[in-house]
Image: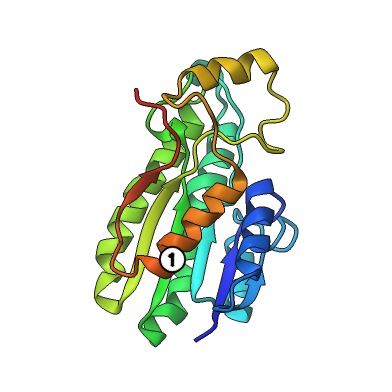
Amino acid sequence: MAERIIITGGDGSLARSAAAFFAESTYVSDILTPSRKELDVTNFAQIKEYFRAHPCDFLIAMAGACDDELLLKTTEQQWDVLMQSNLTGAALCAQQASRVMLKQRRGHIIFISSYAALHPSNGQVAYSSAKAGLIGLGKSLARELGPANIRVNILIPGFLENSMTESLSSNRKNEIRRLHSLQRFNTDTEVCSFLATLHFHLPHTSGQVFNLDSRIL
């Protein structure tokens, strides 16, 4: 059966790469990568309406935001925006997408977390807290939805050289590279290949956290 895929955060480099990758699959009938204008994950009414109009079999929750700041300098608004963008929005998208999945007794949800969830840098307290929350969300939801044959997994792509990190200096990228035991980075394509393998070829895997790069800290 051909599947319908929704990838939130459609403006992002990884989301665009994933859409192009899955478009090559004969198992996929429709791929939607809504931009923030089309699907603002901080707006529950918009989320509800979007998933009502676009039911899916496979949700990849990539939408998020980053705004690094020390906790002492973090405003309530900054905290709320990061929680809503990275955690609450993902939860609400999963809530609405799973309504159809529950009726059809099948589906898959993948939350895109971050290496910062496990090993945050200074000034990432709000961002890392939200991304760590995705791990708890994913594990809890996997247990909740498992009896209905719905899988939920969490993916940490690791450091990628794409539009999200292009503003970093070469020195900073080299510092990060030296933390990798293999001294190299994954690419968007390699992450997308793993997403496809997890979805199409590991049907009995759920509630797991996959960290794709080679940092060992």
* Image spot of residue 58 (x, y percent): 49, 70
Is residue 117 or residue 158 the one in the foreground?
Answer: 158
**Type of residue at label 1?**
His
Which image quadrant for residue 199?
bottom left
- Residue 48 can be seen, yes or no: no
Q: Is residue 80 above or below residue 126?
A: below
Residue with the mark numbered 1: 199
Q: Secondary structure at mark 1?
A: helix
* Image spot of residue 95 (x, y percent): 44, 67
Q: Residues within 10 Å of mark 1 (few under 14, many from 20)?
A: some
* Image spot of residue 194 (x, y percent): 47, 54
Which image quadrant for residue 31?
bottom right
Residue at figure coordinates x 35%, y 83% from the top left: 105
* Image spot of residue 196 (x, y percent): 49, 62
Q: Is residue 182 above or below residue 56?
A: above
Is residue 130 or residue 3 the one in the foreground?
Answer: 3
Residue at figure coordinates x 50%, y 17% from the top left: 178
